[in-house]
Image: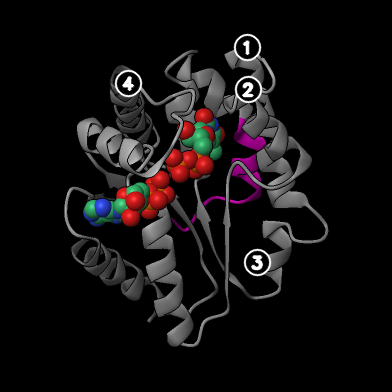
Amino acid sequence: MKKNLFIAFEGIDGSGKSTQVKLLSDSLEKAGHKIYTTFEPTDSPIGKMIRDIFNHRLEADHRTIAGLFVADRLDHLLNKSNGILKKMEEGYTVITDRYYFSSYAYHGAHMPLDWVIEANSLSADLLRPDINIFIDISPEISLKRISDSRISMELFETLDNLRQVKDKYYEAIEKLKDQERVFITDGNRPPEAIFGDIWNEISSMII
Ligand code: ADP
Ligand code: TYD
């Protein structure tokens, strides 16, 4: 068995990340791996502030939000009690629902992508995912899933915005293709079909 992995799931809202994180962690656990699942925005005070902004309890400029995500991510990595780096050292395979590609895609839609990449470079230097799994769904399906499953829509959830975010994901993936391993899977299919692809890819990394 190879070293424990750091796996990041990416995709626009409602792309099925949480669903696939659960399927993957269950399967890896069954195969005998120690698994720690986590997500961004985190549950830290910084992550809570971000959620308050998304829920309109607080007001902030999108540049401030981008900065808060940078800080939230560093805390996600470095936190002494349950930070990702600590979990990796303890031998866990860590699966995160969103990491810095989310910043590239969501904030790159409002400000220069290079700035967002540079602002997240400390995190990238600390820990690069062994694999980023990008679940690609159409913005129309995303919006339908979100409106079926939620009472209120978040800040980014309009069709135009989802299209822009998806485009930025692809721009960032292309730009970073020499540094980042990205596995793209078609998310417009049943969960089991998507998971089949993901499992093939991950299996090849752990055997
Ligand atoms: P995310 O974490 O990316 O927001 P979720 O996994 O929470 O996405 O899925 C969003 C909604 O879509 C949920 O109601 C979920 O049950 C449903 N869903 C997830 N994957 C699929 C799929 N492949 N096909 C149809 N519906 C899905
Ligand atoms: P999340 O709770 O994962 O929402 P969803 O389940 O719909 O994917 O993320 C909340 C929002 O935060 C989501 O719209 C994407 C956004 N986001 C950013 O804008 N920048 C970031 O760096 C991250 C990690 C998330």
Which residue does the numbered mark 2 point to in the structure image? Answer: 65
Tell me if residue 143 is in the magenta stretch: no
Up-down relation of residue 30 to residue 26 (above or below): below
Q: Distance between the residues labelled 3 and 1?
A: 34 Å
**Mark 2 Cβ inside 8 Å of ligand 2:** yes
Which residue does the numbered mark 4 point to in the structure image? Answer: 164
What amino acid is labelled 1 in the image?
Answer: Asp
Q: How far apart are marks 1 and 2 (CA)?
A: 6 Å
Query: What x and y, as percent, mark residue 115?
Result: 55, 19
Q: How far apart are marks 4 and 3 (CA)?
A: 33 Å
Q: Which mark is residue 117?
A: none
What amino acid is labelled 2 in the image?
Answer: Ile
Which residue does the numbered mark 3 point to in the structure image? Answer: 88
Q: Quarter-wise, where is residue 94 in the image?
A: bottom right
Q: Give the range drawn in magenta.
A: 120-131
Q: How far apart are marks 2 and 4 (CA)?
A: 18 Å
What amino acid is labelled 3 in the image?
Answer: Met
Query: What x and y, as percent, mark residue 137?
Result: 24, 41
Q: Which of marks 2 and 4 is nearer the N terminus?
A: 2
Q: Distance between the residues labelled 2 and 3?
A: 27 Å
